[in-house]
Image (tube, grey):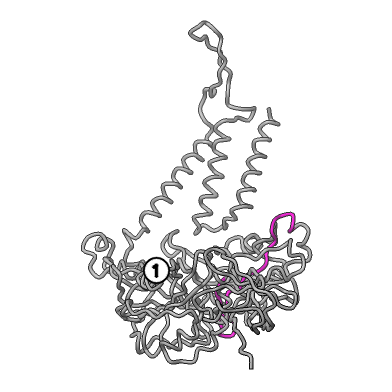
């Protein structure tokens, strides 16, 4: 029987080890994750003590007679008192659960609403006077979906393309005051990792959010620490074993201004009891060497863009505006209660990333009271007063301008031109491709200007030169940003075919077939194209020609 008892304790050790390996709770009494780990371990120990003795299981076989006079064997706990250790452990676990539950309750917003309201302070400012004018050359236009679409097209250019994919991180950062989304390559599965992990990951993707230009960056030294690694090179596990008592969040990928890859893990401490975790610093992990460095908030390097998460920022701002007059005011009179709207986005200003969202009253409709701008590295919060439409109202207004086409508006970007606030909205088709753009007046959201070319749209509304954005449209529509190839030739044979309701012209020239799709923007002479005509156009995917022109003979 002793062998059986040793087996039970061994299985407990295995379970505890597996739990820790997977969940990685910190050994810190200020962490609720630690106490949950302790409770589940203590609970299993108590069950083993309850159902076993030093000589074997605390069961005995009992034979009874059934109603049909048959013998039935069953098992029941042996009589006798529980051991002192079992009783004391059970009481200690129960007491611990009660204490933890009490701590959680007394530190909720019901009892500490005004304390929650004071975690952040908000600087009041005027939008027209204090909000920075938008720099077109640094305007972050690409959303995550568009950045992924552009970045993923570069995967086929690497060696061992079948072994790697691109992580879906696409984290927004600034590099040299220019907004980018960056994402590392990752092993596709465990077997791909097993084959390639000794060589490491040699690339990451960065997509310029202003120009739409993507680059597959090859590192001088490969990364050996990432989220797609296994065992001790996994970023979270590497940091946990190096800092077993520190509370930190999931590391996120960033690069410094020289392009060196790092993972940034925000360090936390509970603000009230064991509740309401709040950042107190960061751990910077070198993705190449595995070396780490801890920084307090005031020491964080300038190139680190994201110390505070969006969830943390939104929660703290909501607490500030909701609980200034206590918890019960939010339930009954709601005097002075404000809140953020349902959506938010990011703006690059200088070398920092800012989250912006709108502030509206507790009984909000389609208007808001101003904009909140939060520095994601320092959590400085500024409220810019401006009565305006909400983002959702601006999106609906933009979609209404092209309702016959059924385009869907993406999350708007807040911009300021000539002291006036606008929402810049991209409108996508069902395939997720950007088809047109809209500038919506933030103060009067019924005033909408739409243009298929972003540079022309901004120039049309503001009178500013926006030629720096001229390459972005082709990037967002999924077309290559590579060097344009101009095709010229003579029509040797001509045919047409209807495809999905559109007429496609097939042109045979110099042994090749080119295609031209008839659209609203096609030249008026296209239906009159004939054999012998000279033509020119930009070569696109699948041998389609864009900007097709018929060359007049001299």
Residue 528, given in percent of the width and then of the height, sits at: 56, 79
Magenta-tinted stretch: 171-193
Q: Is residue 476 left or right of residue 362?
A: right
Nearer to the camera, 409 or 361: 409
Nearer to the camera, 125 or 440: 440
Which residue is found at the position 54% from the left and 58% from the top? 28
Q: Is residue 262 visible?
A: no
- Which quarter of the picture shows residue 15? top right
- Which quarter of the picture shows residue 485? bottom right
Q: Is residue 183 magenta?
A: yes
The C terminus appears in which quarter of the rendering?
Answer: bottom right
The N terminus appears in which quarter of the rendering?
Answer: top right
Residue 31, given in percent of the width and then of the height, sits at: 51, 58
Residue 253, given in percent of the width and then of the height, sits at: 61, 70
Q: Is residue 513 left or right of residue 344?
A: right
Asked if 485 appears above or below 274 in the picture, the reply is below
**SS for tag 1?**
helix
Residue 389, given in percent of the width and then of the height, sits at: 32, 75
Nearer to the camera, 496 or 154: 496
Asked if 173 appears above or below 1 in the picture, the reply is below
Nearer to the camera, 485 or 97: 485
Q: How many marks?
A: 1
Q: Is residue 282 visible?
A: yes
Q: Is residue 100 left or right of residue 150?
A: left
Task: Give the prevailing secondary structure in the magenta stretch.
Answer: strand
Which residue is found at the position 61% from the left and 89% from the top? 552
Q: Is residue 131 magenta?
A: no
Q: Which residue is mark 1?
A: 403
Which residue is found at the position 70% from the left and 71% from the top? 203
Q: Dot 1: within a 10 Å radius of its alpha carbon, few (fewer than 14), some, or many (20 or more) residues?
A: few
């Amino acid at each position: 029987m002793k062998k059986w008892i040793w087996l039970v304790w061994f299985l407990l050790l295995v379970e505890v080890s597996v739990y820790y390996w997977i969940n990685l709770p910190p050994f810190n009494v200020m962490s609720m994750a630690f106490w949950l780990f302790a409770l589940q371990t203590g609970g299993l120990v108590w069950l083993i003590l309850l159902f076993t003795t030093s000589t074997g299981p605390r069961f005995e076989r009992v034979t009874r007679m059934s109603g049909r006079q048959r013998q039935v064997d069953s098992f029941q706990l042996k009589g006798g008192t529980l051991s002192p250790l079992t009783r004391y452990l059970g009481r200690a676990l129960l007491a611990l659960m009660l204490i933890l539950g009490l701590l959680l309750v007394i530190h909720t917003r019901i009892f500490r609403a005004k304390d929650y309201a004071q975690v952040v302070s908000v600087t009041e400012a005027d939008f027209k006077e204090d909000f920075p004018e938008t720099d077109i050359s640094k305007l972050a236009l690409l959303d995550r979906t568009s950045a992924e679409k552009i970045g993923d097209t570069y995967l086929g250019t690497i060696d061992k393309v079948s072994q790697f994919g691109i992580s879906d991180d696409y984290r927004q950062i600034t590099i040299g005051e220019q907004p980018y989304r960056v994402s590392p390559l990752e092993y596709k599965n465990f077997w791909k990792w097993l084959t390639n992990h000794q060589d490491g990951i040699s690339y990451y993707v960065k997509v310029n959010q202003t120009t739409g230009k993507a680059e597959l960056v090859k590192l001088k030294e490969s990364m050996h620490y990432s989220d797609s690694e296994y065992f001790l090179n996994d970023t979270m596990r590497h940091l946990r074993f190096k800092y077993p008592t520190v509370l930190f969040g999931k590391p996120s990928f960033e690069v410094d201004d020289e392009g060196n890859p790092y993972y940034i893990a925000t360090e936390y401490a509970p603000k009230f009891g064991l509740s309401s975790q709040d950042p107190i610093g960061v751990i910077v992990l070198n993705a190449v060497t595995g070396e780490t460095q801890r920084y307090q908030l005031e020491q964080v390097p300038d190139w680190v863009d994201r110390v505070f998460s969006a969830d943390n920022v939104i929660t703290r701002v909501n607490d500030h505006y909701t609980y200034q007059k206590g918890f019960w005011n939010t339930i009954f009179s709601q005097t002075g209660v404000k809140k953020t709207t349902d959506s938010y986005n990011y703006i690059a200003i200088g070398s920092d990333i800012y989250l912006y969202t709108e502030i509206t009253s507790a009984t909000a409709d389609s208007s808001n009271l101003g904009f909140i701008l939060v520095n994601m590295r320092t959590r400085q919060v500024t409220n810019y007063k401006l009565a305006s439409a909400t983002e959702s109202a601006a999106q609906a207004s933009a979609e209404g301008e092209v309702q016959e086409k059924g385009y869907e508006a993406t999350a708007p970007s807040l911009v300021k031109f000539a002291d006036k606030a606008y929402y810049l909205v991209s409108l996508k088709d069902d395939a997720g491709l950007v088809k047109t753009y809209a500038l919506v007046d933030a103060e009067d959201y019924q005033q909408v200007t739409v243009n298929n070319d972003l540079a022309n749209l901004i120039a049309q509304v503001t009178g500013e030169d926006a030629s720096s954005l001229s390459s972005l449209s082709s990037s967002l529509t999924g077309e290559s940003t590579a060097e344009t190839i101009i095709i010229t030739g003579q029509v040797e044979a001509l045919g047409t075919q209807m495809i999905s309701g559109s007429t496609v012209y097939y042109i045979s020239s110099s042994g090749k077939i080119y295609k031209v799709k008839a659209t609203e923007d096609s030249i008026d002479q296209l239906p009159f194209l004939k054999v012998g005509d000279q033509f020119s156009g930009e070569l696109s995917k699948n041998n389609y020609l864009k900007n097709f022109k018929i060359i007049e003979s001299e």
